[in-house]
Structure formats: structure tokens, C-alpha cells
Amino acid sequence: MALVLGLSLSAFAGEERIGSDKEQTKLRVIATTDGEVDDRCSMVRFLLYANEWDVRGIIHSSSKYHWKGDETRPGKGWEPISWLDRQLDAYARVYPNLKLHDPDYPSAEYLRSQVFVGNIAVEGDMRAPTPGSNRIVQVLLEPDDSPVWLQAWGGSNTIARALKTIQEQHPERTEEVTKKARLYLIMEQDNTLRKYIKPEWPGIHVLRSGGHSFGAIAYDWQKIQPKDVQSYFDREWITTNILEAHGPLCALYEARDGRFRSEGDTPAFLHVINSGLRSAENPAFGGWGGRFALSNRVWKSVDKEGASQHSILRWAKDFQNDWAARADWCVKGYDEANHPPQVILSHAHRLDGRAGGQIELDASDSRDPDGDTLVFNWWLYAEAGTYSGPVTIKGAREPAATLVIPDDAAPGDSLHVVCTVTDSGEPRLTRYARVIIKVKE
């Protein structure tokens, strides 16, 4: 029996929070992976950000490109699951140093306890429960109403199997699960979204990153990225900042001739890194993992070929520098490495104003843990709001600024203003605060 539940923007609305990133609750995250080489590259980065989330599962799954095989079909391009063991062994070796930079890093033993084998036999396999699908069921049924971010780096079949188990064994809890589950899919790497998830769970929140969005940091990155961004992915940058002298975990990164190869799955967790952009609150907000628009009950990425403001690449220099700093954390002491600034607003993240009026913006309380000098920039994130015309921001390069709401802004319009704060450390690190201004009568 299919569920009949609505899908709305309001379901993603977050609480008002003012302060540093560390004051916010960690999101629950489960990653499913088919073990392709770009998954393995993404996992190196994922582990360096494991302190950012409550990691509740790392689950082997299949896709239309990779499966193990069984009595019905031979395997296809399957990487033995021991690849993840090797990465966790390397993580264990750098873990003591990572803890110097953030005590929230989980131990390798904890992360190993979150590894499960899901539905890996064939493409789209959801015939029977597996340890991996059962782990997803367990987390979704926990007495916790906070979101669970289910990432499909390969196919969505293990996630689909978990939902089917809940539908069959716990039908009275389907509405509860619908409200808390957040699916972030990198394409549709099997048919389970169309064949099962959408028909049977029409109200569940699905974000689907399409070709020109995740593709910007996938195999064809050189065809999509502008030249000034490519320098952060080329041989010199990757070799210097990741591969050489950054410990055993980064040494496992499978670059191509020293260059970036592909991390097509990385947007799934970039989306839930707490950078201050608040992208996890609403898919339409946009952030490191892209920006989305609702279409046929699925949030689809907005990027098309030739897009002038790519929703992922506009942040690429920032998140590459951030990754380089994490690599430093593997081998350097706290005083030798850089750490991101904390952007702190002196007012709410949502403000109201009338057309022609002024809004005072203030991030003067922002600070840097290393004592670095901070550079501020207030700007209109036009694509994320409903007003996209020119906007005057007085003192845009100062900690405190004044925005003039345009005279032609209509009641109900929203303006998304981002305060970008970059430190003077090496590499230079950036965090943000987003202020949403609603035009009233």
C-alpha cells in the first residue's frame, strides 16, 4: 500500500541558531557505496570530515555499474570490500593526530562498527534484507525525530530494501520515517527510485544530483570546470596538498598521474558539512553540495551545461582549501595547521524589512581559533532567493554592513545574503553566515 504524504519546503525548515558551527547539533549520516574508484577517493575525504557528523553507517551496496554477482548473474567491476578496511586502517594511524585538531573525531574502532554489507549481489538488488539494509532500518526507527541523511554513492537499492522492510514490518511507523529520512542520490544508479521508492514513499525527501552538478568534480571535471578552478585539482595542487607528506590515509587517495581523478559522490556529504550556508535546512538554499529545485516530487540539481554560476563550483576553491587543511591535520600539530573561522551574527538569521528600507547586518563577533586576520564579504546569493535584481550593500567588505532593500522588491520576496569570512592562514579557510530577508507589506 502506497503512502500518501505531502512534500513541502517547510519540512526542511531549521531552527534559528546564532553562533559558531560547534553550537549546532550534528546530523546523522549513513553513506552507501558501490566501491568504484571515485567512491574510494570520496571516502578518503569523507573520513577526514567524520568529526562533522554522527556517522551511523558506512554500507557496501551495488549499482548498475558495479555488483559482486551471485548464482543468477556474474559480477561486474566489483572491488572487494577490503578497500574500506585498508582506509580505516590508515585512518587509525592518523587518528591520534586528527584528535589534536578536534576531539570529536570518532575512533577507527567506532567507524568499523558502523560498516555493514548491504545488497551487493546484483544491480538493483532489494530481494531480501541484509545486514546493511537492517542497519538503516535500525537507525530510522530510533526514537529520534532528527533527520537521517541517507547517501547513495552507488545505487539506492540497499536504502530501498530498508524502506521495504519498514513498510512490511512496521507499517504504523511509515509516516514517522517519511518525515525524518533524507535521501541524497548521485544520479539514479539503479531503478529502485523509480520502481519502488517514489511509488511507495511519495512523501519522502529525495535529492538527486544530476550530470552537470556532481559531474563538475567527477571524471569529466576538466570539461566542466573553468581554468581558474582547475588549478585546485591539477597535479601540482593534489600532489603538494594531499598525496605527499600527509600521512597514510591521504597516500591511499587514488589520483590519476598525480591529478584529481574523480569524486562524483563527494557532493552527497559536502551538502551536510556545516559550513554556515545551512544547505541541509532546505535543498533550494544551495551550498557546497549543490542547489536543487523541486520537480515531480524529487529535488533535482539545477546545473546545466554552460551554467554561469555553477551551484557547486562557485564554492570549489573554498572546499578544496578546506580539504587541504584536513590533510594537514593528519600530520601537523595544532599550532602548525590552520582551522576555519567561526562566523557569528549579532542578530537572527531571518529578518524582515520593507521595500526601500535598510537592514543592518553584523558579524563583528566572528573569530578565528588561530588568531588570523579575517576578511569579510557580504553579497546577494540571488539564485537562492526570489529577488534577483541588483542590491546595494553598504560596507560590503566590513564586518558590519547595511543592505538597502530595492524599491521594486515585492511583498513576500526573499533575499538571501551571505557573509563570507576568510582567514589569513595557510591554506586560507572560509566559512559563511546566511541571512534571509523577507520583504513585508
Image (cartoon, grey):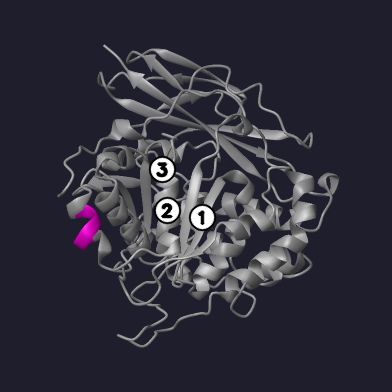
**Which residue lies at the image location 73% right of the left edge and 61% below the top edge?**
92
Q: Is residue 54 visible?
A: yes
Quarter of the rendering containing residue 367: top right
Given residues 112 and 388, the one toward you in this image is: 112
The residue indicated by pointer 1 is 57
Q: Residue 130: where, in percent of width, then height?
A: 40, 65
Q: In this view, does 268 lie to the left or right of 126?
A: right
Q: CA separation, marks 3 and 2?
A: 26 Å
| Residue in front for this viewpoint, 398 or 437 | 437
Q: For the residue marked with disc 2, what is the amino acid?
A: Ile
Instruction: Determine the secondary structure under disc 2.
Output: helix
Q: Which label was assigned to residue 286? A: 3
Q: Nearer the viewer, mark 3 or mark 2?
A: 2
Answer whether labels 3 and 2 touch (C-beta < 8 Å): no
* Stretch in magenta: 194-198
Circle 3: residue type: Gly
Residue flagged by tag 1: what amino acid is it?
Gly
Cβ–Cβ below 8 Å for labels 2 and 1? yes
Residue indicated by mark 2: 136
